[in-house]
Amino acid sequence: MRDSPWNRTLDRRSFVVGLGCLGTGLRGPRVLLERGARTSEGAQRSLVVLQLSGGNDGLSTVVPYADDAYHAARPTLRLGVEDGLRLDDYRAFHSALERLHQRFQEGKLAVVEGVGYPHPNRSHFKSMEIWHTADPRGRAAGDGWIGRTCAAAFGADVEPHRLVHVGPNAPYSVHSSEHPAATFSVPEAYRWLQEGQELARIEAGEREAGAGSSLAFLRERMRDVRDSSASIRAAVARYRTPVEYPRGAFGESLRIAAALLAGEVGTRVVSLELGGFDTHNDQRNRHEACLRTLDEGLGAFLDDLERSEAGRAALVLVFSEFGRRVDENGSRGTDHGCAGPAFLAGASVLGGVYGEHPSLVDLGEGDLVHTTDFRSVYATAIEATFPVEHSTVLGARFPLLACAAALKRR
């Protein structure tokens, strides 16, 4: 197993909250915490991972309004404090993020600055592979990071509904050779991601002599999938909430995700996606529309989660494959960049700003240089949610953020 010099002080059973955390979110002394899979209410913890596809412009999401270099780099796209929702003396949320700003003020949303990785790749496909596997080799490294987390957390319990992607295109992050995922798309459709592969193996097994035991196992697995499908559909169908979700596929996907977490069917990880963030042109209008969709949907979802013990035990991680370049282009947009903010949200998250905002002057080929390794965010999410040592999933140890500390204590 590879080791990281950042984390040689962390043992395999506990960690010190606060290592590697800077900014307004860090309050009080460091706290030694043990891993756990349940809250004090007895609810099992769960993880929701929301991917903002296309490369979200972090500088128009968390706006460094007090930085002169920002205003110089973006003569038409720049936003002032009067155009946003103030977080502190340096940064503000885009004005479209009203509900998330309220969450931040309530101390239930953490902004993690400068998230990225060494030797960044500006290709959507390759960068996504790196994020999805938590490895610079991408798919060549094997299973996705969420799939590996589930394999480590659940072991032989391979019921498909433990891990569900809500939406039409499941990301590689949920791929697992040991712990299969399922998808639930809008309108309602449920399937096991590996169903086609397993059916092909069953058919092949029927043609092979001596394949009886393996064939019986695969047939039993398919029966489990059918039973799981029925329970998942029933949980979604009977779900009722007073929270009003926005119309459209994204709002409906979030409502389904809330139903899965509250439905007592055993779903522990939910994956979702919101696209449209590749704003090479007309960014001001297009990006505002994306952020408003995000704010309305995620705001409703977070409100809904607080209605149940299971929902209050959930941790929501929001990320994008990369940020955008610092300078605007000639089409009043921005091109592919590198580092950008990530978010952690939930009823028990220790909110605030974490990490260091990248310099807008000391750039790497015109891009922001990351100050927080994205695997630190993953490590925090893994250990705040499951009784799993993050290095068993990520292959090395990374600094843990304090913003999920309250999940351990409550």
Image (spheres, rainbow, N blue to C red):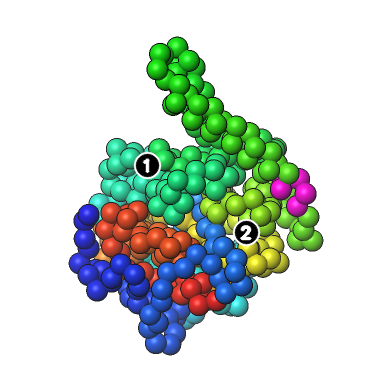
Residue at image coords 53%, 33%: 221
Q: Position of residue 226 (x, y in %)?
A: 63, 33
Assign the N terminus to one quadrant of the image: bottom left
Residue at image coords 22%, 63%: 4
Q: Is residue 179 visible?
A: yes
- Residue annotated with mark 2: 298
- Residue annotated with mark 1: 143
Q: Position of residue 43 (x, y in %)?
A: 60, 66
Q: Is residue 82 left or right of residue 157?
A: right
Residue at image coords 47%, 71%: 404
Q: Is residue 349 left or right of residue 244?
A: left
Q: Residue 64 sits in which quadrant?
A: bottom left
Assign the C terminus to one quadrant of the image: bottom right
Q: Position of residue 336 (x, y in %)?
A: 39, 48
Q: Is residue 298 left or right of residue 381?
A: right
Q: Is residue 91 visible?
A: no
Crowdedness of circle 1 by 10 Å Cα count: few (<14), some, many (20+)? many
Residue 23: which disc?
none
Magenta-drawn segment: 235-239
Q: CA distance from mark 1 to mark 2?
A: 28 Å
Q: Amino acid at mark 1?
A: Asp
Vertical relation: 119 (above or below) 43: above
Vertical relation: 80 (above or below) 221: below
